Amino acid sequence: MANVIETQALTKQFKGFVAVSSVDLKVAEGSIHGLIGPNGAGKTTCFNLLTKFLEPSAGRIFHRGEDITGLKPAAVARRGVVRSFQISAVFPHLTVLDNLRAALQRQNGLAHQFWLSDKSLGVLDERASKLMADVNLSEFQDTPAGELAYGRKRALEIATTLALDPEVLLLDEPMAGIGREELPRVIDLVRQVAKGRTVVMVEHNLSVVADLCDRVTVLQRGEILAEGSYAEVSADQRVRTAYMGSEHAH
């Protein structure tokens, strides 16, 4: 399978501290690729580099074989490489439907025509309805976002990101703050949105990673420690040692 995202010797230094060091990452098209590692391993910095929210100190980033290292964040997003929660400010007082309308208006360049007629908004409603169905929120279309349970709010955030029609979706800890009873629903949500696109996710919950990810890259102190299927990396003694003393030592 072709690599949709690739990095070569990607490095980020902050005032003498190396957060990401010479990372060669290859993300296969259509895969769910997990980025894991102990706290301070450089996972979120890596995400910020891929989406150009941070400039690399060295190294290069490729999307479909084209060097995108010099692009601005908006240009990277226009190419379809979108990070969830970077754009999806959910408006708590707006309903689920109106949140998705707002996201779609932004995507369709209608943001400056905020006072659209209902007829124009009707065109967006069809797409909004599909997005709601995709994330199992149809029955909540008239509920203000602020009243949603945490897991459903997360689903709405992901739906507003999907309004941008990303080809590569980067999810930064999608399970953070999710209660145990809501976890299966959010796992299903990620699996659903991964159909027909590539997902890269930073995730602390290793059972979620085991369940969802086709391939896993383990970072430690900014460097790639191991890579492979979850079964392969979890059997790696170096990975076990890196996680020792952390909550996932078992």
Image (cartoon, grey):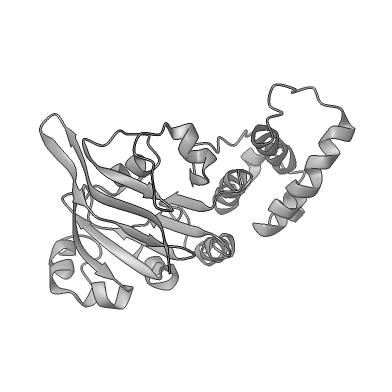
Horizontal and vertical percent for residue 91? 62, 33
Going by the image, does 228 lie left or right of 165? left
Q: Residue furthest right?
A: 119
Query: Is residue 226 something one can see in this rendering?
Result: yes
Quadrant in which the C terminus appears: bottom left
Query: Is residue 83 something one can see in this rendering?
Result: no
Quadrant in which the N terminus appears: bottom left
| Image height of 20 relative to 204, above or below | above
Horizontal and vertical percent for residue 184? 52, 67
| Image height of 228 relative to 134, above or below | below
Give whichever of 188, 245 is nearer the camera. 188
Residue appearing at x 34%, y 39% in the figure: 69
| Image height of 77 relative to 23, above or below | above
Count of number-bearing discs: 0
Horizontal and vertical percent for residue 53? 37, 34
Q: Quadrant of residue 36?
A: bottom left
Residue appearing at x 78%, y 41% in the figure: 124
Horizontal and vertical percent for residue 38? 22, 55
Q: Residue furthest front?
A: 66
Going by the image, does 118 lie left or right of 180? right
Going by the image, does 68 lie left or right of 118? left
Give whichever of 1, 44 is nearer the camera. 1
Residue appearing at x 46%, y 63% in the figure: 29
